[in-house]
Amino acid sequence: MSGDKAPVFHVDGSRTAPTDWTSDAMRKRIAKRYAAERRFKYLGLAAVVLSASFLVFLLWVMVGNGISGFQRTEVRLDVDFPALTGGAQAASLTGPQAGTAAASMDLPGVVSVAIEAEYGDSGAQIFSPGAWQIVRKKLLAEPSLIAAKRTLWLPASSELDIAMKESGNAKTEALLADLRGKNLVRTGFNDTFLTGSDATDPAQAGIWSAFKGSLMTMLVTVLLAFPIGVLAALYLEEYAPKNRWTDLIEVSINNLAAVPSIIFGLLGLVVFLNWMHLPRSAAIVGGLTLALMTMPIIVIAGRNAIKSVPPSIREAALGIGASPVQVVFHHVLPLALPGILTGTIIGMARALGETAPLLLIGMRAFIPTAPGGLTDPSTVLPVQIYLWSDEVNRGFVEKTSAAIIVLLLFLLTMNALAIYLRNKFETRW
Amino acid sequence: MTDNDATNDPRARVARQTGGASSAADGPFQATGMADPKMSARGVNVFYGAKQAINDVSIDVGMDNVVAFIGPSGCGKSTFLRTLNRMNDTIPSARVEGDIRLDGEDIYAARMDVVQLRARVGMVFQKPNPFPKSIFDNVAYGPRIHGLAAGKTELDEIVERSLQRAGLWNEVKDRLTDSGTALSGGQQQRLCIARAIAVDPEVILMDEPCSALDPIATAKIEELIHALRGQYAIVIVTHNMQQAARVSQRTAFFHLGTLVEYGATSDIFTNPRQEKTKDYITGRYG
Amino acid sequence: MNQQAGHTVTAFDAEMSDIRGMISDMGARAEAAVEAAMKALRTNDIDSARIVVAGDKAIDAIETSVERRVVQTIALRAPMADDLRDLVAALKMSGVIERIGDYGKNIAKRVGALEGHGFLDSNDQLFRMADIAGEMVRMAMDAYARRDIDMARAVCVRDDEVDQIHKDLFVDFIAHVAKHPTDATEIAHLLSISKNLERIGDHATNCAEMVYFSQTGQSLADEFE
């Protein structure tokens, strides 16, 4: 059948047999090509599955370890407020003087008396030393509590907490079993973790100060790096003449993006702390250092985004009589914005997770209260995680993992915000 | 107004427009010498780095005629077109020498405002390139940046007038907020023409405006050019000789950067004087 | 003027040369028809005359063919400049040559009517006119084949001679009829033949003018004004 086809004539008059597409050799060749296609597809799929499984593994371990950080063991306590506070009135706990009023009631004393009354000597081991703060919080939230006897669930001590979640020594286990038997113990939500600051006692430790520190540092970083990065990218792409100097600058920026972050920490130490004498461990210094680190990434992403705006749009705008600045801000920038925002997301995500440079500029101190302003000493989430992971107390293990979960959620929210902004600005072509 | 009025023998008209020189008796041709040209070029040379792209071209463009630039690929017609509104300024290696005047003013003089020049000499490009904005914003952009409208009503009027002149109003009047890029190719090109018209130019330069369009869209644009003739001086660069023949009253043939022949379209296409022109238009070139 | 380089699209060249070939063919046939008709007239050969009359159909067929081909080429090739003029010239010439063929046929038809009257023996002028007219057609077709405008000009010049002979013959024939009214029919035929030959000369001039137009784009008549 294949021999019946007409011969192929070439330009020089020679003839060859036409290609036989159905011969065995051809069929085998085609089969091999399809096989290669399939192999490649499965290889790609395997790579994706492997990466996904790493991610799942990480999340699984983190969540598994950290979820208990959001819980705390609570023990029941009956408090006879009228008797112990000497008939304090609910009215005194309302209004602007409530804090002073609460302080004057000696709530720590009230609580320890109540504990001793109910649990005797072992009471100190059962409850957390910060339990009175919870009572204070509840009273300020609901002043009417002070009028009668109340049953409160207060946080247990660290040992009891650990014994409840994992295991403790024999004595604590016995105590726990005893309390359980009497239905005096339960597991509740640990809001101190989210609202409190660093503490030596894991049961009282919270990440709010680190979170706020991260927030302020990120704010400083983005406010500095984004405008400078975008403007630099615009200048380099639109206005800079194409000569040796701009090539040098381009190479330098590319290299800057690859510099290890700890070197930026060193730079921050020398320039911001030693030269400019900015307050050590402050959010502003951290923000400045991270801005230095993030800016090259934004410049690179910005340049690529601007390069990808088709020249036909620029020509159309110029042809209408727009000045170069108008071309850039009315046409190029809006079209390049999605790409720039993507670069910013990448840069900010990296900055959020940076620990080394911030350690060098001293954001590793023990911060018991949340920072008030940019110049107050603060710490950031990754550093807090690092510090807690160093702690001896077993209670901090779960706190570390819980902090990691918070960090991941922060990251996700930040990315979601940037993606939302990017989609909003993405104009459909 | 037809091209071949009974009272207008083509040769007499050319003679009038070339300042009285008789076309048959003259040596090569007369590209200049128009009585009141809108734009005039004298001895224009354009270099891209060391390479010369345009070689001593002199030509006049008048208000009441459409001029077509024809020639093989790489002959410099687009390059020359772009010198008329200084678009070559955007190319760093381009250098323009010679005298080009708009209404007698040298457009390459230091005190000529490029931004204003480009509003007076508008350009329509080969591939339709509407801004990724709404149809209204596309047309309104020019008037907005040049401050041509006192208020919103005036801007609306300008937009409506431009779209009507471009023959697009009836097709888009109900969807001015739709994206300009959602239109068909031919409509997009008419939108670009409306955009150029909106800034009230005096000259419109068209660089192969129909080469990306189908025949029906092309015909609509040719009809539009015919309607606009007389209101603007129009120069159109085209690869398609039949289009040049249909659309223009005067044709200039470029070859390797030189202006070989410039004359009335009917003369160029029925009895060209230069051998090179004849070879090109009869398909004997190359 | 020599034919310059061929078109990039060679099929265009083939079409043009086909059409030119058909015109040349027509011209040769028309010229042969006139010559044969005059010969048949002189020798009173009815059979030859019939052949001439039958041969006219072929000329008509070529004319129709040329028309069709020219319209097709214009539609498909969008010819410009000299190609366009060539085609327009070919179209006009085909009509003109067809008429020359018709006159030849007309002359041939009259062969039987002039039998044995001896008028033709003393009518050298008529045959001289036929010779000149035939030569004009030949020259015009030569000029066409060779694109020779000088030869075209020469054709136009000779038309005056033909016209003059016709005028003289006209006067002679009228005078003869006045003297010999019974010969009216034959004289009428002779007048027609003379008129046909004069028209053939005019048509040959038209062909020459077309040749001149296709080569230069100008009208030959303007030159002669």
Image: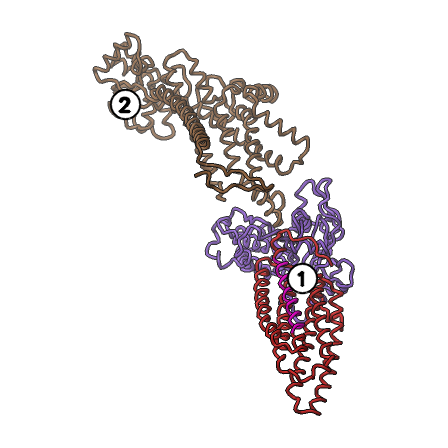
Chain colours: A brown, B purple, C red
Which stretch appears magenta?
C15-36
**Can residue C107 be seen in this snapshot?**
yes
**Can residue B157 be seen in this snapshot?**
no
Asked whether the beta carbons under mark 1 and mark 2 sit within 8 Å of each other, the answer is no
Residue A246 colored in magenta in the image: no
Is circle 1 on the same chain as circle 2? no
The part of the image, by quadrant, that contains residue B245 is bottom right
Direction from residue B80 to residue A415 in the image, left or right: left
Chain under numbered label 2: A
The part of the image, by quadrant, that contains residue A388 is top left
Amino acid type of the residue that numbered disc 2 sits on in the rendered structure: Gly
Q: In the image, is residue C109 above or below residue C90? A: below
**Local secondary structure at mark 2:** loop
Seen from the viewer's position, the closer of residues A41 and B170 is A41
Mark 1 or 2: the one toward you = 1
Residue C24 colored in magenta in the image: yes
Amino acid type of the residue that numbered disc 1 sits on in the rendered structure: Thr
Seen from the viewer's position, the closer of residues B218 and A68 is B218
What residue sits right under mark 2 in the picture? A87
Which residue is farthest top? Answer: A170
Q: In the image, is residue A125 above or below residue C201? A: above
Q: Position of residue B1 (x, y in %)?
A: 62, 67
**How many numbered markers are drawn?**
2
Seen from the viewer's position, the closer of residues A67 and B161 is B161
Q: In the image, is residue C186 above or below residue A357? A: below
What residue sits right under mark 1 in the picture? B270
Chain under numbered label 1: B
